[in-house]
Structures are given as structure tokens and as C-alpha cells.
Image: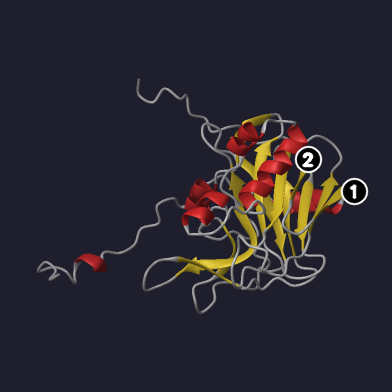
Amino acid sequence: MKGPADAEARPAAPPVIAYDPVLLPPVDMAARAGRRAAMCAAGSVTVPPREARTARVPAGGAFRISCPEGSQVGDLNLWAADDPAERFYSGKTRALHGTHVGQGDRLWSAFPYLRPMATILEDSLDWYGIDADGGAVHDVIGTRCDPYTHVRLGGAPYHQCCHSNLTRALVRELGLPPGEAEGRVHDVLNVFMCTGFTRDTGQYFMKASPARKGDFIEFFAEIDLLIALSACPGGDCGAEHSSDAAICRPLLIEVFEGEGAWASPEPAPYDRSHGI
């Protein structure tokens, strides 16, 4: 189709950052790093391949996710430990920090809370940056592999998708009926996953994760957290997911506790009147 007379001029409009993170309250990373240096190990959980596990992390503590045996992608959910309605909001995290998160970025909770749930303290893959394909690690753009999309795309029912893994983990942790547990599973932080959008069609792509044995990402818990992590059936996601074809490896969650109370951030100071 032939474009309008100003077809070349319209795309030349300059981009504008919609939500400038510079306007957010500053994060005292030195204080968090200092507290982390004095923390003690409080436990660990191994997440088996094609399964999910949960862990609880106190406010002012930390948790580390690592690859103990080799490259493996994980799908992470977070909730306020005492209020499951407050959960990780990947969309707003993406709007504030970009499509992929790293050291110093924060994981934000859903409305009406909209406060930092966790802050990324350290990332062994921070060196990766954005590659020639536009790929980067730790994305907040993908959802999670799930059985609904899988069957829509012609696959047979598959119960080791991350959505189902996370659902089973919540059933075990909270004793909920499966339907209620499933309703609490939400869009994820794709830990160690290397993703982007194709430049010609704008389609979401994945490629083999650059993570290797020993790689890790570590988070400071700003509030009391319940987390759930799925070891994705796609392994390093270099070929496919939602099947048993890929080589899958475990992930490790380590929890650390600090001394003394931590002042958690307050929810967003909006009165929820919505102009009514």
C-alpha cells in the first residue's frame, strides 16, 4: 500500500522514554551490599529439572539463583509472603527498567501496591549486554511456557510447562486447590533466558542462554517474600520448550538472612479515588 505524502517524516519523530527511572527514589546499593556482606546462610532449595519449588525470604534478606550443573533457564514468580494479592508486576518492571533487568534494577509489585519487592544485587552475566541479534538476559517480556498455548500451537497436553510447574509448587506450599493456585501464577522474570525481538517482524525470540555452571543472579528482599522458581523444560532454551526434548538441569535457590529489622518500602501513596 502506498503511504501518505509524509510517510518518511512520521517515523522520524524522536523516541521519548515513557517512564524515566531517574525520577524514582534513589536506591542505596552500598547499604544493601553492606547488609548482604554480614548475612548468614538460612537454607537452600534445589529445583529439579522440569519442576518448580518455593522458598520464603525475609525482608532485609537475600536470595541467590544459580546454575549448579550447567546452563538452565528459570521462570520466577514473587508474592508478598503475607498477602498473595501483592505479586510481581513484570509489565511495570519492564516499563521502568527495560525489557531485561540487571544489577541495581528492581522487581515491582502489582497495583495498588506498586513498590519494590526485590532489588538485584549482583549478576554474573552482567557482562553480556545486548548482542548482535538484539538478545539480552533476564527478560521481563516473555510470559511463561504454558499448556494452553502449547495445545493451541498443535502440541499434545504437556504438564511440565513452567505455568503448570509453578501451579503445582503453590499447591504444595499453600495447600490450595489447583484452580486457586493456578490463579496466583503470573508473568515471570525469565532468569538466565536470552531473548529479544526480531528486527524485521518484531517477534519474540529466544536463543541459547549464555549461563554456565556457577553463574548466578542475587536479589535483596525489600519485603517478606514467597518465591517460586521453575526449571524450564526448554533447558537453555536454545531450541524449543514445552517438551521433553531439551537437556534440562537443576537450579539452586539459596536464602540468606540479615540481622535486625529492615524497613520495607510503603505502597504507592495514591488514595485510589480514581477521580470518583
Residue 187's place in the image compared with 136, above or below, is above
- Would residue 21 be visible to someone looking at this image? no
For image coordinates 54% across by 72% down, the residue present is 130
Q: Hey, which residue is sitting farthest top in the picture?
A: 276
Q: x, y percentage for residue 76? A: 66, 51
Residue 167's place in the image compared with 215, above or below, is above
For image coordinates 64% across by 64% down, the residue present is 234
- Would residue 259 be visible to someone looking at this image? yes
Residue at label 1?
40
Q: Hey, which residue is sitting farthest bottom in the picture?
A: 132
Relative depth, front residue between 76 and 101: 76
Q: Secondary structure at mark 1?
A: strand
Q: CA distance from mark 1 to mark 2?
A: 15 Å
The answer to which image quadrant residue 64 occupies is: bottom right
Residue at label 2?
56
Q: Earlier in the sequence, mark 1 or mark 2?
A: 1
